[in-house]
Image (spheres, rainbow, N blue to C red):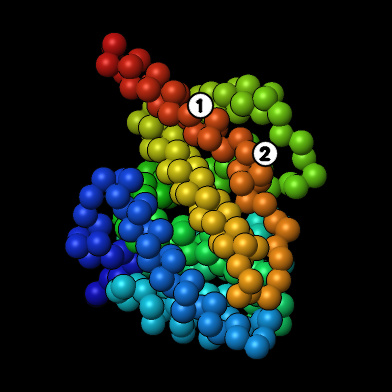
Amino acid sequence: MRIPKIKFSPKYRFGTPAEKLKTAEKINSEIFEHIVTLYDKRDRVPIREIEREYKKNLPETIYLSIKKLTDKEEEKVGGLLSTYFKDDNAIKFKMSLPACNNQLKFNMLPILMHESAHLLDYALNPKKTKTYAKVINRCGIAEDLDNFYFKNIYKTDSKEQCTAIDIIKLKQELRKLLTEIPSENRIITLNYFKEALESEIFAFKEEQKYISLINDSKDYMCYITRNAQKTLEKFKLNEKLETIKKIILEIISSERGK
């Protein structure tokens, strides 16, 4: 059976991680320029139109659907990119957006570009979907790890005040989690968290870029008050990424010393 395509061909995936991010930024910008024209003389657009325009302007076809966030998803996130697997293979992406009556308001476009950044990151870096597949197939606790991620790493409660103590608590919770996981799966688990954070940091930066673009341009029809950069700082995602990297190095060093 032919596996649906969820990654770009090598000609797009060539280069260092930094070069791939530049490629993702370029594609995201090109997609935005097409999608924003859908909002001429209207402030909301049906998701099906966005999906059609999005697919038309990707450099290559990948298996993607765009849907409205479910009520359960809205309790956790403002937008979501989901990856679906069959056996060991990622077979589909689904982008979920905060749509009303299956229409996306103009002021939600930066969230679309945030999720689009995730999509492009994974399409250009298929090893990230392979890491998640390993978490599912080897660890068998993907749901538990997702719950851990949202509870301890990517806190999405806007009312919660994130302070330095979060980093201390994260270290404690990570070490506790690792004691419950077989040693052969610890690096896989930490890489899963690391890659998720790297993608999230990139997506927040892309979101802020489009918030600023819309707010600074007289061509667009509304001012967006959301500040993705402050959200990135509040959740301390960069600090948490560095914490996870250090623990990975500690484990590698410990294993080599045995």
Q: Disc 2 vs disc 1: Cβ atoms closer than 8 Å?
A: no
Residue receiving disc 2: 234
- Residue sitting at the far front: 218
Please give the name of the residue rendered at 35% of the width and 31% of the height, measured from the top-left corner. 184
Please give the name of the residue rendered at 32% of the width and 76% of the height, measured from the top-left corner. 61
Secondary structure beneath label 2 = helix
Q: Which is more toward the observer, 84 or 204? A: 204
Q: In which quarter of the image is the C terminus?
A: top left
Residue type at numbered disc 1: Thr
Identify whether 86 is placed above or below 57.
above
Q: Which is more toward the observer, 23 or 115? A: 23
Which circle, 2 or 1, is nearer the viewer?
2
Q: Residue 192 placed where, x, y %?
A: 43, 42
Q: Residue 243 carries which label?
A: 1
Residue type at numbered disc 2: Lys
What is the total number of numbered labels drawn onto the structure image?
A: 2
Looking at the image, can residue 102 be seen?
A: no
Q: Quadrant of the N terminus?
A: bottom left
